[in-house]
Amino acid sequence: MTIMTKMKGAATAFSFAALMSVGGASLASAEDVTLTMAVPDWPPTRIMKKFFDEQYKPKSGNTVKLEVDFIPWPDFYTRVNASLTSGEQKYNFIVSDSQWLGAFVEGGYFRKINDLLDADPDFMATFKTIHPNPLNAYSTYPHKTENYYGFPQFPDVLVNFARADIICHDEEQKNFQAKYGKKLPCTGEELDAMTWDDFKNVGEFFQRKKGDMLAGKPAEDDFYGIAFQAGKGYDFSSMQINGFIWQMGGDTWDETKAPQGQAEGVVNSPAAVEALTKYLDLIQYMPPVAKTGTMDIFVSDQLFREGKVAMNIDWIGLGEASLAADSKVKDKLVFGQMPGTMGADGKMIRWSNIGGQPFVLTTWTTESQTKEAVDFVKWWLSNDIQHQFAAGGGQSAVKAVYEDPKYVTYRPWNRAWAPQLEWQKDVWHVPQFFELLTQQQDQFDLAITGKQDAKTTLDNIAKFQQDKLKEVGLIE
């Protein structure tokens, strides 16, 4: 529905045009303000809407309604892009993926927010206490400048979801030690210390057929040690493979180095090829759906919740579903940081592609809608609400909130939150991001489904990116 601001009755309509004197004081009339928002359909946005409906009271005295379109993740970009580019001006408030910023800023759809921050020093102070990695990813265009376009709505990172009843079982522990000469990770701290080689070992060790012994009893179904995203849709494989590339000393095309930064020789470097090969080696130990290129974040999560996987690397944003009543593993969980790569200095390298999204305002949002939207964001980023959000299954990138000792007590995965923030990177805020992403996803799918090797895949990606980015002047 198109955003509308309505008067409340004839008396209100009159008083809106002129100030009404009451008891010697001049009062402006209240308005009905509707904010229409497009969001991905998953727990963090459902929680946000619930909080708004149950708790939010506008300071303005206006009646503010938040109308939300919950859009499935695989269709989210295409639906929002179609709305924005059609000129229908349906949304004035969007929970955007970070990579959309360049395309929709340059297209004239996303509103710069520096003036809103500059007008409110207290709000700017809160804004600047957000961890720099999510702040840069969700808010800046060009990337890592002080041109701001977004307010963090839900920051997200990848963590390791694990079945404590399986991995901590005495017999499984004993057999794993005998086979690999290492302890099978069981506690959160032991999960934190896992490398990708350890993760691969868990995958190999726990491949069991229906009826095989598993944690002291016959497996009710085929069982797998590991799950991780390997999906062709949207960005489901790219977000994982980027982390492998960064961890192993490779790089993606870096927009902050434009126009000197190259794609060929970087995207397909020997380190990047080795990293993609390492990622592909894990596919054989995952449920068969991974080999079809359809293992997205929700399939991976569903398999874990159905009790078919020992360890699953997935976004914290899906953690709440693992605790739901229909989850077969809800009382059997332990969480840790996602695996990393051991550096030559003996320290763990944990680079990962950041998840999560910002709020953005559209350029046609009216002054009254903008004021109400900003007031809502200020409320959302307040310490009290951020604590409540974290306690309800969300996350906060506000330093005073996530550094509070209470924070780790809210949800079992919160222990892995703050340490992972230090290792988050992002890619491609440039307007051409979707062309880059679509071609890359197609190429990764060929590798995941066994039709192409890692080197050919990255050579093809590097050439496409080099040609495309030279064409638009982002590479000299």
Image: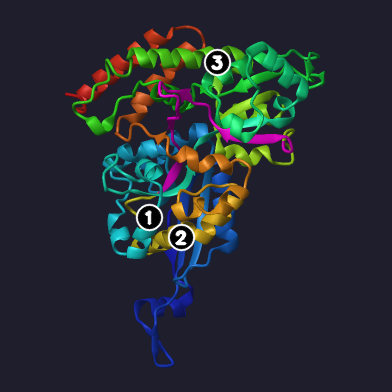
| Element under disc 3 | helix
Task: Work out how far the residue at label 3 is from the one at label 1, CA to CA, in angstroms.
Answer: 39 Å
Q: Which residue is mark 1?
A: 127
Identify which amino acid the numbered label 1 is placed on: Phe
Q: CA distance from mark 3 to mark 2?
A: 43 Å
In this rendering, position of residue 328 left or right of residue 415: right
| Magenta residue check for 353 | yes
Q: Give the secondary structure at mark 2.
A: helix
Observer-side mark, 2 or 1, equals 1
Q: Which residue is mark 3?
A: 282
**Who's the residue at 43% across and 16% down the image?**
275
The reply to whether dot 2 and dot 1 touch (C-beta < 8 Å) is no
* Residue 410 visible at all: no
Residue 51 x %, y %: 57, 57
Q: Which residue is mark 2?
A: 376
Foreground of the two, 261 or 24: 261
Range covered by the magenta-colored residues? 330-359
